Amino acid sequence: MDFEFSDDQQQLRDAVRKWVDRSYDFDKRRAITRAGGFDRNVYTELAGLGLTGLYVSEDDGGMGMGPVEGMVVMEELGRGMVHEPIAQSLIAGGVLSGYAGADLKAAWLPRIAGNEALVVLAYVERKARWKLDVCETQAQQAGGGWTVSGAKSVVTAGDQADAFLVPAIAGGKMALFLVERSAAGVSANGYLTIDGGRAAEVKFANSPATLVTTDGLAALQHAVDIGIAALCAETVGVMDKTVDLTVEYMNTRKQFGVTLSTFQALRHRVADMKMQLELARSMSYYASLKLNAPAEERRRAMSRAKYQLGNSARFISQASVQLHGGIGVTEEYIGSHYFKKLTQVELTFGDTLHHLGEVSAHMQDTAGVFA
């Protein structure tokens, strides 16, 4: 299998990295966090690079690219810990392209690609514990349309989004709906997340909705899998910078008159960090390459990848703090923000124990050997 990136993919990586270096430094990120964790102007700049339409076809105004390009973009955004939710645009573009009818695609995909609409996935419920088939939100037919009633938690940029993709039970079966934030009965209470980004608790009270698909569980699983693959790639970018920052610190900080990098035990710890980084990178590649696989195979791949990424993120973030000492957890130092970002990874799209359970449940006759 060829793991070399094409010239177009390298150019895409370079363009995003240059934007991050030029337009999203640590001070800019902290200012955005203080202002609420989301900046529409920054999101507009990313849309100008074509990133919001990455998974939208060229006929609908997007770039018509695939999972590898998505992975490349998310790695670079991870290096800068960019708050603005490009991953949500990938989810919306992928799900609407794959499941919506022609009229709904025509109405929303060009708006997503053209930065006229931020559409985010609103699926987490308090009782679900990351089980996608647990849903209390209800949908009812009203005249020629639908209404949705229920509540969703930890919705990314939920009070800033223009619309939501909402799973709800319709006639005893899960369906997927699109609900505009401006619709009657929609309320969103926003707050900062642990990494300085933005989320919201969103409630729907007989809110007008548009049906995306009656096969809601399959669409939701696909949406979450797109999110997991994007998160894995973003996490690799965060870990890559965390390792670089730690190595730089050890090459400059002195103890007993010599730099920390001369101590063999500390060098071994850095070697362990780099090993965990490469394990995570390989599983991120695996997740992205399996994103278009059949549903059962894709779901197993995402759980395997998320489990490894969770372990690697925990090891690298904790080792970085230990090697830095007290400065590693101070608000003024960028390393503490990488730590918080990697901590939040554990709680996004299912934690490590949840995905370990998913991997175990699907071992069956293979006894865990990856086919």
Image: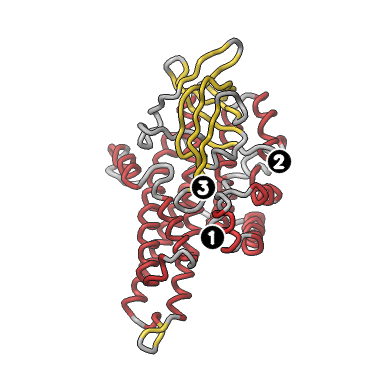
Q: From this viewpoint, which residue is outermost toward the bottom?
A: 257
Q: Which callout, 3 or 2, points at the residue further toward the start of the chain?
A: 2
Does dot 1 land on a helix, a strand or a loop?
helix
Q: Which callout, 2 or 1, points at the residue further toward the start of the chain?
A: 1
Q: 238 above or below 51?
A: below
Disc sitting over residue 79 in the figure: 1
Q: What's the colour scheme?
A: secondary structure
Q: Which callout, 1 or 3, points at the residue further toward the start of the chain?
A: 1
Left or right, 117 with respect to 249, comes to right
Disc sitting over residue 230 in the figure: 3
Q: Marks 3 and 2, Cα distance to the nearest angstrom?
A: 20 Å
Does dot 2 land on a helix, a strand or a loop?
loop
Tell me which amino acid carries mark 2: Gly
Q: Quadrant of residue 164?
A: top right
Q: Quadrant of residue 145?
A: top right
Q: Is residue 321 visible?
A: yes
Residue 307 is situated, as x and y percent measured from the top left of the image, at 36, 49
Tell me which amino acid carries mark 1: Arg
Q: 224 above or below 217?
A: below
Residue for badge 2: 114
Residue 126 is situated, as x and y percent measured from the top left of the image, at 38, 33
Does dot 3 land on a helix, a strand or a loop?
helix
Q: Marks 2 and 1, Cα distance to the nearest angstrom?
A: 25 Å
Q: Mark 1 touching mark 3, by CB under 8 A?
A: no
